[in-house]
Image: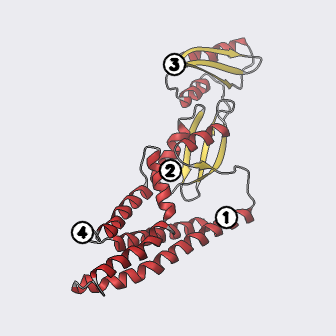
Amino acid sequence: MAKTWTFPVRGMTCAACAAHVEEALSRLPEVKEARVNLATEKATVVTEGEISWTEILRAVREAGYEVPTETMVLPVGGMTCAACVAHVEEALRRVPGVVSAAVNLATEKATVTFIPGVAGIADFKKAVAEVGYEILDVQALGVAAKEDEAERKMRESRFRMRVAWAFTVPIILWMLPEMLWGVMWPSHTLFNLGMVLLAAPVLFWVGRRTYRSGLTAVLHGYANMDTLIALGTGVSFLTGPASFFFPVANYAGVAAMIMAFHLTGRYVEETAKGRA
């Protein structure tokens, strides 16, 4: 399907300049038609299929002119791992008019270079939202506000980690007799019930963000680290209730341990970001 794009071109001074730009653009395989307006200093191209904006910039520059670009740094919410970074970068690079996009997980920011008039903040927000993430307020925050936000994230992640271990340490201690001597104290039923009751808050209270992030990724057609953690801990937890009705081992306590270690990693990550 043919699409029409209009973008600015700088450096033209006469009709011959416009003709040179038209010729350079027309040589690109994706471009079916190219028109340049000297008065408005804009080029209009009709393309078929995917278009490489890097190639368009190169063609215009090699002809001796310039397509102005802008660079914007966007705070991105919802990323948790390298897979998230890759999906956000891919989504931004697919936006028509984007020349390059790089995402930094540590700072939770995306740096996007684009052609003004072709792409803009609304396009970036839509593209990122479609893969399950969010571009936050792009207005510049003061240093104090940034520090407050970093402190809030560290405080929340520290709370989740501490609560997780508050329930997980008793699980570990309770499991020791069973692991060392094969004794489910005080009884098989109470042991299984205790594992389920202690593991539930770790997974579904302080660990709920992991499940939400993992589910969001799946609904958008991909998997991230949270998806794997959610799948592993979720299946393990289900063996707890199942142990009351079927002869299966109860791994609900193990699920809580995995989540506790995962939330500890999240706390270390947020602490590193806050100090960056």
Q: Position of residue 138 (x, y in %)?
A: 70, 49
The answer to whether mark 4 and mark 2 are in CB contact below 8 A is: no
Tell me the CA gap for discs 4 and 1: 45 Å
Under mark 2, the amino acid is Val
Which mark lies nearer to you, 4 or 1? 4
Secondary structure beneath label 2: helix
The answer to whether mark 2 and mark 3 are in CB contact below 8 A is: no
**In the image, residue 254 above or below residue 215:** below
Under mark 1, the amino acid is Glu
Q: Residue tagged by mark 1?
A: 149
Secondary structure beneath label 3: loop
Would residue 188 be found to the left or right of residue 261 on screen? Answer: left
Would residue 56 be found to the left or right of residue 219 on screen? Answer: right
Image mark for residue 248: 4
Question: What is the crowding at mark 2: few (fewer than 14 residues within 10 Å), some, or many (at least 20)?
Answer: many
**In the image, residue 111 above or below residue 10:** below
Which mark lies nearer to you, 2 or 3? 3
Give 143 or 60, whichever is nearer the viewer.
143
Give 133 or 245, whichever is nearer the viewer.
245
Residue displayed at 27% across by 80% down: 188
Q: Position of residue 50 (x, y in %)?
A: 50, 26
Residue 179, by quadrant, is: bottom left
Residue displayed at 69% across by 51% down: 137
Residue displayed at 62% across by 42% down: 125
Please report whichever mark, 3 or 1, sits nearer to the chain's N-terminal start: 3
Tell me the CA gap for discs 2 and 1: 21 Å
**In the image, residue 168 above or below residue 115:** below
